[in-house]
Image: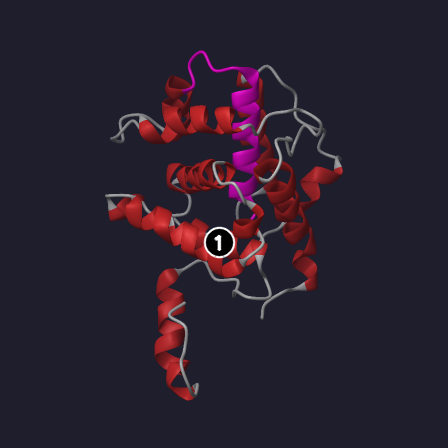
Amino acid sequence: MARISEHESLYLAFDEFLNRCILDEDCLLWSGERVWTLENVAEVKRRMVDTAIPGTDLSFDEKLVEQMQGASPELWMLLCDVYYVYYLPSSQIRFETRQRNIQWAAQHGGRTPPPPSAEVWEAQKGGFSRTGYRYHQKYLQFWLILLFADHVKSQTAPQAIVKNPQRMQEVLDGMLSSIPDKNDRAYGMRHALLYLAFPGEYERIISTADKQHIVKIFGGQIAGNVPDD
């Protein structure tokens, strides 16, 4: 449907994330480091999601520092990978901003990220969609990535989820619907993850409203049963 040659680096980077971090325990930015264990994912989830800090008195960074007090280097390395995945969809966040924020998180873990010339950064030089205010509320997007990783790693057949578009969609939708406050549901990240994983099955659109508008305008031109998504 929407696989585009200029975005191959994005697809490859996200595929690496799924295979090395979600299905295995490797680190994306520090290859060979055992970081994405179920225990580490659950601990970062406990700190960021289960004990969220409400309100706007503190910035995202200030909240994160408070939540990660006493965290091991591995937990900060895991967060650096989450930053990396978070940035993949955006075509408007500057490359320097991405590297600076990942460098900030790495320093808190006492680590040095790969140099700017490293191949791992190639996928961070673009993006496939403009991103707005809601997507830039990092905590929403981070939450969904962590919830997804925690769920998949807890399953006896994780590949049945990450290699099957319908199952992955069902899992992500179930997670979003389980979040009590609708304002905390990262639909943009949901759309982004599905497109990056299955660009032949999903459109490169992260706006639910845009998707609904397209269906409303053109849906009547399609004969037979039309899927909800």
Seen from the viewer's position, the closer of residues 167 and 227 is 167
Q: Secondary structure at mark 1?
A: helix
Residue lying at the far front of the rendered structure = 156
Q: Quadrant of the N terminus?
A: bottom right
Residue 54, quarter of the rendered image: top left
Residue bearing the label numbered 1: 168
Q: Is residue 49 above or below residue 158?
A: above
Report how many numbered discs are placed on residues in the image: 1
Residue 95 location, x and y as percent? Answer: 61, 41
Q: Is residue 87 magenta?
A: yes
Q: Quadrant of the C terminus?
A: bottom left
Binning the other alpha carbons within 10 Å of mark 1 as few (below 14), some (14 to 19) or many (20 upward) gives many
Query: Which residue does the image show at 38% across and 26% down from the upper left?
Result: 46
Q: Is residue 216 left or right of residue 197?
A: left
Q: Is residue 206 above or below residue 154?
A: below
Residue 189 location, x and y as percent? Answer: 45, 49
Residue 216, quarter of the rendered image: bottom left
Seen from the viewer's position, the closer of residues 192 and 98 is 192
Q: Amino acid at mark 1?
A: Met
Prevailing secondary structure of the magenta residues = helix
Query: Which residue does the image show at 69% across and 56% down from the upper left?
Result: 8
Query: Which residue does the image show at 55% across and 41% down from the upper left?
Result: 85
Residue 49 location, x and y as percent? Answer: 35, 31
Magenta span covers which residues?
A: 68-88
Q: Is residue 224 left or right of residue 73?
A: left
Viewer can see residue 91: no
Viewer can see residue 65: yes
Q: Is residue 214 magenta?
A: no
Q: Is residue 173 left or right of residue 111?
A: left
Query: Which residue does the image show at 70% across and 38% down from the upper left?
Result: 120
Residue 228, quarter of the rendered image: bottom left
